Image: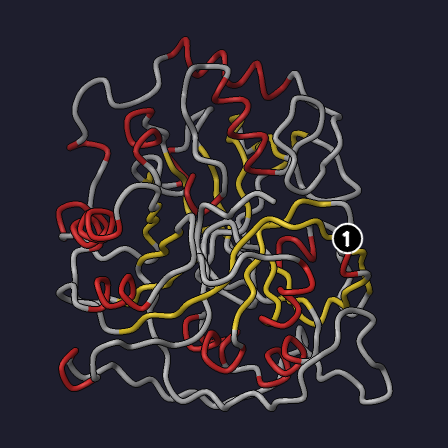
Amino acid sequence: MTLVAVLTADVLLLTQPEATLGPAEVVRATPRQTPLAQKRPLQQPSAGPAATTQPVAPLSKLHKPNLFVLTRTPFTNEMLQKVAKLSGVRALELADAASVTLDGKRVQTLAVNPSTFRSYTPKVTASSDALWQNVAAGDVAVSFVLGSDGGLALHSRVSAGSAGQLRIGAYATTGFGAVDAVVSKQTGRSLGLPHDNALIVSAPKANSDKLRKKIIKALGKGTQVAMVNPVLPQPQQKVTQQNWPAGSFMTGDQLTVALKAAVSKLGRPYVWGAEGPETFDCSGLVQWAYGQAGVRMPRVTHQQWVTGPQVPYSQAQPGDLLFWRNDPTNPDYISHVAIYWGNGKMLHAPRTGDVVKIAPVSTRNLAGVVRVSPIAAAKVR
């Protein structure tokens, strides 16, 4: 079972009193049900593992996740205390993380405590009592992209290896990198997930890059730390193309190679999670095509969003990347990417049941246009 090298979480553990850590920001949210997470009917028991009967605690506050930490062995109290004592750390959340097979797809999955983990998710997701009660009852919540583009119908049942079948209880994007499924701790045990190997760190006032290095030093060899909602100095957050050094961007030859590689895959089927060379999802196509030009692109859309400066759509050039925010469960999340082809056209892998194609650019929910910098792309973690 492949461990997830991205972002996840479970039991809320503060190893220092909140008074010492400083007052946590409290965001009141009215719990509500959404069309993407309707409460499970009582007469329809889970087809998966035995479900907990414990009620899910109501949402009282939100914690902004800033770093995701993954270790080879379970977190111990000593390890948690080392992280909690670092300057700026306000809250921690443990989880179980691994890649599991759902409906024949390898999906990076978290097993969590629904009552506490919900506080680390986007407000729309966190506020849905029905969503988290369904997870506690044995359902799996999958990301909006996996559900809509990957073809996992809401409330359907899908195969889950030795665990039998799991019901798709909700579409819910957690915002943690490439994590596309969330289950309860109890369901995670039936799936064989490792215990307590992932930690979410909320440190809203600390420099995320510096804190990342401190965590790696404190926990030692084998620790992986990715930034989520990074807090960085203003000069690193506001960058324009004009103040990037010469040689930061792809050469004409590189752009030609990447575009030729992408167009050579017209008609290939969309398969969620596929990276080529014969099937692709949207970000997999981008990674493969730019890889042919020697550009080390990160794998998922939200990482590809930060591979260069943003430029106005009116100034888009062939080879730039177009991004959309189509996810109602996390309106700020980057959920789709395409390659700008020129003359108002784009080349992309749309969704399950479709193929790689050239199509007119849709500006609905368009998040922006990025000019790829190989230097920046290689640094994304």
Q: Is residue 140 depicted above or below 257 in this figure?
A: below
Side (left or right) of 172 relative to 309: right
Q: Residues within 10 Å of mark 1 (few under 14, many from 20)?
A: some
Secondary structure at badge 1 equals: helix
Image coordinates for residue 64, horizontal then vertical, percent: 33, 69
- State the colouring used for the structure image: secondary structure
Side (left or right) of 188 relative to 372: right
Q: Nearer the viewer, residue 42 or 1?
A: 1
* Amino acid, disc 1: Gly
Q: Is residue 126 depicted above or below 204 in this figure?
A: below
Q: Quadrant of the C terminus?
A: top left
Quadrant for residue 221, please give it: top left
Q: Residue at x 25, y 23 (%)?
A: 248
Image coordinates for residue 53, horizontal then vertical, percent: 67, 88
Q: Quadrant of the N terminus?
A: top right
Q: Residue at x 57, y 43 (%)?
A: 2
Image coordinates for residue 291, horizontal then vertical, percent: 48, 20
Q: Is residue 377 depicted above or below 326 in this figure?
A: above
Quadrant for residue 198, please give it: bottom left
Residue hosting label 1: 161
Count up the numbered dots.
Answer: 1
- Residue positioned most to the top: 253
Q: Nearer the viewer, residue 250 or 296?
A: 296
Q: Residue at x 35, y 19 (%)?
A: 250
Image coordinates for residue 297, horizontal then vertical, percent: 43, 29
Quadrant for residue 241, please give it: top left
Side (left or right) of 214 relative to 14: left
Side (left or right) of 132 relative to 244: right
Q: Residue at x 23, y 81 (%)?
A: 24
Q: Nearer the viewer, residue 227 or 301?
A: 227
